[in-house]
Each structure stands twice: as C-alpha cells, then as structure tokens.
Amino acid sequence: MIEEKRKEATGVLLQNGHIVLPDRTYVGDLRIRDGIIAETGHLEPEEGERTLDCSGCYVLPGGIETHTHLQLESMGTVTADDFETGTRAALYGGTTTVLDFATQFHGESMAEGLARWHKKAENNCYIDYGFHMALTEWNADLKCEIASIVDGGISSFKIYMAYKNNMMLQEDEIYDALSETKRLGATVGFHCENGLLIDVLVKEAKARGNTLPWYHQWTRPPVFEEEAITRLETVNALLHADHYVVHLSTADGLNAALKARSSGIEVVLETCPQYLLLDNTRYGTEMSEDFEAAKYIMSPPLRDKRHQEPLWDGLAGGDIQFVGTDHCSFNYRGQKEMGLGDFSKIPNGAPGIELRLLLLYTYGVEKGRMDISRYSEVTSTNAAKYFGLYPKKGILLPGSDADIVVLDPKPEWQVTSDLLHENCDYTPYEGFYMKGSVRDVFLRGQQKIASGKLAKDVRDGQYLKRGRPLKDIM
Ligand code: URP
Ligand code: ZN
Ligand code: ZN
C-alpha cells in the first residue's frame, strides 16, 4: 500500500500506446508526473515509477464536452442528471472536462444565475468543469454585466433564436450583445431556429388537434435552421464578432454557414452525435400514437437521414469544428410523459454525455470516416482551443494537464441503458453496435477509471476559468 502510494506520487508511465497528436500518431510512451504530462517519446521506466501497458490501445487527450444542461430547470421540471451523475457518466465515457450552460433566468442578473450554477457544481463534479453563460433576455443591465462575467472566467455565452417569450433574442438585441462580447474578446454560441415561426406552427398544429409527438418536428423544419443561420450571419457581416452555431443539425444549415464563411465571416460550428446518427423516423408518422417518440423530442429535432453524411463530411473535412452532446436528460417516465396529449409540453432534450467519445470512435474512426487525429481534434483539441483552455487541456504535450484516455479499440458491444451511468431511464442509442471501450481515464494525473471501473469515487473536479478563443481550428 505504502509502496503503491509512493509510486503514484513518483508518477506513472503509460507504455507502448498509440499516442495521438493532431498531426500524427506513434507507438510510444507518456510520462505523468505531478498531475501533468512530463514527457512523451520512447521512455524507460524510472526508479519506483508505476507502469501501465497500453499496447494495442490509443492514448488520447481527455474528452472535452462542449454542451450540457446539468440540473437545468426547464419546462416545469429539472433535468434528470445533476453535476454528480452527469459528470460521473462523462468520466466513464472518457470525458474529463465539461462546459455546462449556466442560465440567467428572467429578472435575474447574470451574476445571480452564475452563482446558482457554481453552487450546483461545487464539490459535485468528477471531472473539471467550466460554464458558458446562457442569456434568456436582453437589456442594458445585462450588457453592463458581461465584462464581469468574462472576468470570472466565462469567455462564451449562448443566445437563443428560438423559444419566443422565454429565451429568444432578436437581431437588434443580438447585434448589441455581439458588439459587447466582441469588445471583450468573448464568443457567443447561437441556437439557430426561427422562434417566431415555430410559435405560429405550434399554435396551428394544436388548433387542428394535432397533439402527437410527431408534430414537434413538423413545427421546426430544417429550413428554420438554414434561415436563422443566414439571419445571424447578416448581423455578423456588419460586426465580424466571434461566434459559433451550437448543435448544427442540417446539411442546409451547414451550407448557409459555409456561404457566410466564403464571404469572410469566421463562423465556428458544433454538431452533436444525435444529428450524425439518429433520424426523424424515430418520430414515427403523423398518425403514430406511440409515445416512445417523446424520447427523441429535442430542439432542433432529429432530421431526415439525408442530412447525416454532409454533417459527417463537414466534421471529417474541417468544416465543423467540434462535437458536444447537448446532454439534457429527462426520464421517459414522469418527465417526458408530461407531454402526453400535447407535444409542446414534452420537455425538450435527450441524454448523450457518456457515449460521445465511443459513438464518434465507432461511427467516425472505425467506419473510416475520419482518422484518429481528426477524431481527437473534434472531441477535445478544438474545443480546448476555442474555449480558452489550450494547451492546459486538449493535447498530449509536456506541461499540459495529464487528462488522458486510454481507448481500447477491440471490444465489440451493444448499448443498453442498463450499462450506462447516466441518471436517465433510457438512452436514445439503445441497441447501437459499438466498437471500443474506455479502458483507463486520468484527470490531472489521478487515475479515475481503471479497466473500465471507477477507481476513486471522489468529486474533485475543478472549476476552470477560461480565456479568449483561439481560432486556428478552422
Ligand atoms: O432540446 C434541447 N436541446 N434542449 C436543451 C436546450 C437547447 O436548446 O440546447
Ligand atoms: Zn439550443
Ligand atoms: Zn443545449
């Protein structure tokens, strides 16, 4: 025991792994000492050093999850995962940093919203964490507050172009907000849909007695995303402020963003596994009485399959920069069921935090859509850069935090929600074939997952004060 403790203090040598860097992968060793990566290369064990054989496995930077809603109060309920269960599930899945959306509700200052989020997260996280600040309204007081929020280590905000009367901001407000974030060197993520027209269609559907879950996606067609991105980029043609599109779900939205880029606007893009892998057949048909469709009610909704390959191509080819899950879990029983008889009352969102890395590995790398270096960029490095965490996070370089995933590419298995650690009574990926497993995870040099099991049940995740976006990811 004493000997083990002494070895842990001395360090750990990961041996013979496929070390993944942005520009190459090589078989070698990685030395962890005092919580950071001490060196990489072809290394001999030092006196008293613990060694871990990583032959046949990838050694990757810990995953960075860019988009979660943990313990979020929404639509009359609270998301099923809080910071404890959500970050534990993330850890099992190889994610070592999470960026959650702290939310300022109506009438609140951002400082009040942020203080509540700090309280939710403090001493409850298994992994390191930071916050984006989500705005639900706009006024002069909030504008004045942005500088102090940025000072508190929050260099990214979220603005909704959907959820009228609840969270939606319009172009004049967006212009004003972006002017201020630009002045302060922060970025803003945009939820791109047409909130005004969604409202019209929801009212129309309900007036006709169309209340089944299928109608959720009928009220939010792909063209609303394309239109909202085009509208957003009109504002950015005037301002050229740092911004990105969250949870991009359509090929048409991607094309709108690429058009803006070709005119010199630097728009960064995030997509999610659900838009790459699930499609709108999950909603059945407009006659389907099967309420199971509620499990897939999220905004934006799942799309026609035709959108998937363009999104994969965008991700692999460099047009889309990173992948977050928009993990926003509600149990089917008791929560999704709040919308029985009225699709507009089904809480929006689905779980996904635990499977992000392995879904992307199986359907991205194993299926030959991207190589392992691009995989580590879109699951970790690019997010670290864009969200002001690089090179502390997101790369296997000497001096970086030793946040490391050892991914074994060999196991084949099938997803069932019983195997997962998310606090939700279903997974949208039930039955999915998977290749690979997260064998070991280190957070700042501490081994948290060993052979797929929780090695230490401690919630010592640290709050990350973040800096300005780095933009060499496009
Ligand atoms: O349906 C979703 N995605 N709910 C979470 C809020 C959002 O728009 O990201
Ligand atoms: Zn959103
Ligand atoms: Zn979201």
Image (cartoon, rainbow, N blue to C red):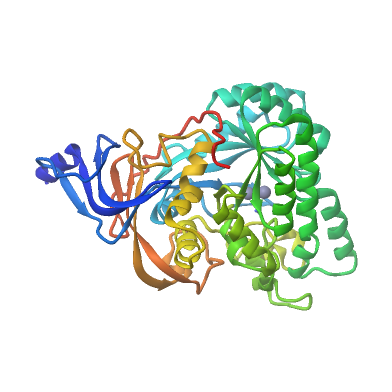
Q: Is 451 in front, or is 256?
A: 256
- Residue at 64% of width from left, 72% of height from top? 292
Q: Is residue 57 left or right of residue 394?
A: left
Q: Is residue 163 visible?
A: no
Nearer to us in this view, 71 or 4: 4
Relative to 299, 412 lies left or right? left
Q: Is residue 34 left or right of residue 215?
A: left
Provide residue 237's location: percent of width, then percent of height.
Answer: 77, 35
Q: Where is residue 33 in the image (x, y as percent from the top left)?
A: 24, 37
Question: What percent of the width, then of the height, locates residue 195?
Answer: 80, 49
Q: In this view, does 38 lie above or below 77?
A: above
Residue nearest the observer in this picture, 244 or 349: 244
The image quadrant that residue 232 belongs to is: top right
| Apparent side of residue 152 relative to residue 242 in the rendered image (left or right) | left
Location of residue 287 by image quarter: bottom right
Which residue appears at 62% of the width and 64% of the height?
A: 309
Residue at 19% across, 44% down: 43
Q: Can residue 265 be seen in this view?
A: yes
Q: Quadrant of the C terminus?
A: top right
Question: Which residue lies at the image location 64% right of the left edge and 47% below the top edge?
Answer: 246
